[in-house]
């Protein structure tokens, strides 16, 4: 078993040295990068993307990146950096190797004797976790951003309603709401600013609003976009539509708060049973148990 471990360790070390040698640029390549991107030394993101680029080629899927599902997930998470694909797929390539190697070294240092099949199974599980860990982190980022937008969008709709009723147009109202919501929600402010920039660049309002719904991935914003589009087509009052929509959003937020409050008792059950109840039982029952033991032990000793 020790011989197998030594051989695997040597092979892993040689593989890491080979990868580092492959990734390290030579003098000519470094000079070309300095000429093309003078500020690359101070930009850690570009440096990390340059290192992870060759690794990303091993796992990046072939096809149109602009219309891929992963790019849409990046946009929903608010990640718009051009270096994000290289870092993401580089991590998906490197993390399985790193976690499997660290797991094997940890088992060897702990002197845990395992059969060969079990060891291979453990390493495969660690490699699988490393492969799906970037997806899990990306999913959590998407969920957090959607929740932030959902919780702050009712206030934005109310502000938009006030602006429209005060006489501003819809585009001017969105600009004003984006400025006012900057302190409370950076994600929603960013999306509204992008929508305003698309409108100023010549895109139609309908297309800009649809892009807003696609970027956020929130169902309420998609419904908001459909409502505004129908108001423009049929000539109905935008203020009245916003009033009804904002009331519906406030009702949904209230229902969600009540739902979370109803789940609180169930979530508190396990900490109570595992942490608080044992301490209460010890404090309440320990004196009675000691008295019973003092009474029964002499009686049982005298009987025997």
Image: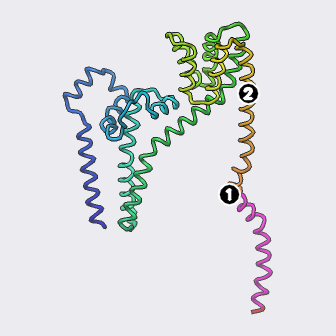
What range of the chain is rendered magenta? 273-302
Q: Earlier in the sequence, mark 1 or mark 2?
A: 2
Q: Secondary structure at mark 1?
A: helix
- The picture quadrant where one finds residue 18 is top left
Which circle marks residue 248 in the picture? 2
Quarter of the picture containing the C terminus is bottom right
Q: Residue at x 60, y 30 (%)?
A: 218
Give the label, 1 or 2, closer to the camera: 2
Residue furthest out toward the top: 167
- Classify residue 292 as left or right of residue 145: right
Residue 71 colored in magenta in the image: no
Quarter of the picture containing the N terminus is bottom left
Residue 276 colored in magenta in the image: yes
Look at the picture and state if 155 lies above or below 273. above
Q: Secondary structure at mark 2?
A: helix
Residue 191 in picture, x, y percent from top left: 56, 22
Number of numbered discs on residues: 2
Look at the picture and state if 16 lies above or below 293. above
39 or 264: nearer the eye? 264
Q: CA distance from mark 1 to mark 2?
A: 41 Å
Which residue is under mark 1?
Answer: 275
């Amino acid at each position: 078993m020790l011989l197998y471990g030594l051989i695997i360790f040597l092979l892993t070390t040689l593989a890491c040295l080979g990868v580092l040698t492959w990734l390290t640029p030579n003098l000519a390549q470094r000079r070309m990068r300095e000429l093309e991107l003078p500020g690359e030394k101070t930009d850690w993101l570009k440096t990390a993307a340059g290192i992870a680029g060759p690794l990303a080629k091993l796992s990046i899927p072939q096809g149109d990146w602009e219309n891929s599902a992963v790019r849409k997930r990046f946009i929903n998470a608010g990640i718009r950096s051009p270096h994000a694909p290289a870092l993401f797929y580089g991590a998906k390539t490197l993390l399985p190797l790193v976690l499997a190697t660290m797991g094997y070294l940890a088992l060897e240092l702990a002197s845990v004797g395992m059969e060969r099949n079990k060891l291979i199974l453990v390493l495969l599980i660690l490699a699988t976790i490393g492969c799906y860990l970037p997806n899990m982190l990306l999913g959590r980022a998407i969920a957090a951003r959607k929740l932030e937008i959902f919780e702050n969008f009712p206030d934005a709709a109310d502000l938009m309603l006030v602006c429209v009723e005060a006489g501003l147009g819809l585009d001017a109202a969105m600009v004003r709401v984006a400025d006012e919501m900057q302190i409370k929600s950076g994600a929603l402010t960013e999306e509204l600013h992008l929508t305003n920039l698309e409108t100023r660049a010549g895109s139609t309002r309908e297309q800009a609003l649809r892009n807003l719904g696609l970027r956020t991935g929130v169902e309420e914003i998609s419904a908001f976009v459909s409502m505004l589009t129908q108001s423009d087509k049929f000539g109905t009052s935008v203020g009245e539509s916003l009033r009804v929509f904002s009331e519906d959003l406030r009702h949904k937020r209230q229902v969600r708060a009540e739902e979370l409050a109803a789940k609180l008792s169930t979530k508190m059950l396990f900490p109570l049973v595992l942490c608080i109840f044992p301490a209460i039982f010890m404090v309440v029952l320990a004196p009675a148990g000691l008295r019973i033991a003092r009474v029964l032990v002499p009686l049982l000793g005298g009987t025997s």
